[in-house]
Image (tube, rainbow, N blue to C red):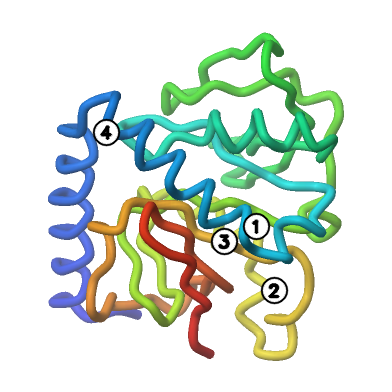
Amino acid sequence: MPSHSDLCTRQSLRQQLRQRRRELSPRHQQQASMAALRQLLKRPEFRRARHVAVYLPSQGELPTLPLIRHCQQRHKHCYVPVVSPKQKHMTFVHYRLGHTLRRNRYGIGEPNPLRRRRADSLDMVIVPLVAFDRQGNRLGMGGGYYDRCFARRRQRDQRSNKPLLVGWGYSFQQTDHLPTARWDVPLDAIVTDREWIACAG
């Protein structure tokens, strides 16, 4: 379990960086999203990927619309997360721009969960961030859905398996060292508006 000090640090970071995200103008958000997409397009890992999971942003998260549009233009299959708060689990559902969405309890859009895909059969998962460090440690919104969904990846011998977990965030969300909890699942890489970061470990 993380120490009381670490928990306080995580909560303080979450509050500060969520607020900073919300203060960004729509123009700034879109410019950062396009810059992150340019970083991703350079990567062979993304060019090879056929089945890509992408979140639908809320509360100032780095937008994903340009990424979703690019995937559709290149005939990649996109999926978005659908959560079950009562059972505390997450699945991935096929999505195309224009699909009807309903708001879940967190105010995030979700499509009709008919065409699901197993998480371990995806090629790449674009993961939202509140904070991160260059070792691949991630701080999310606190629900733990991604960590539970990919819990097997905490085993060292599972790190090389699909899917590739790629954080998607603003460069200002980077911290020197992020306190971790035993349930945290590390990222394989992170894309920001400035760079692609191949994570250590």
Q: Please, what is the three-letter code of the amino acid marked with disc 1?
A: Cys
Q: Please, what is the three-letter code of the amino acid marked with disc 3?
A: Val
Q: Are marks 1 and 4 in contact (CB under 8 Å)?
A: no
Earlier sequence position, callout 2 versus callout 3? 2
Closer to the eye: label 2 or 3? 3
* Quadrant housing residue 87: top right
Q: Which of 138 and 23 is in front in this view?
A: 23
Q: Which mark is residue 149?
A: 1
Q: Nearer the viewer, residue 14 or 143?
A: 14
Earlier sequence position, callout 1 versus callout 4? 4
Closer to the eye: label 1 or 4? 4
Q: Do the residues labelled 1 and 2 touch (CB within 8 Å)?
A: no
Q: Are marks 4 and 2 in contact (CB under 8 Å)?
A: no
Residue under numbered circle 4? 28
Earlier sequence position, callout 3 versus callout 1? 1
Residue under numbered circle 2? 152
Residue under numbered circle 3? 166
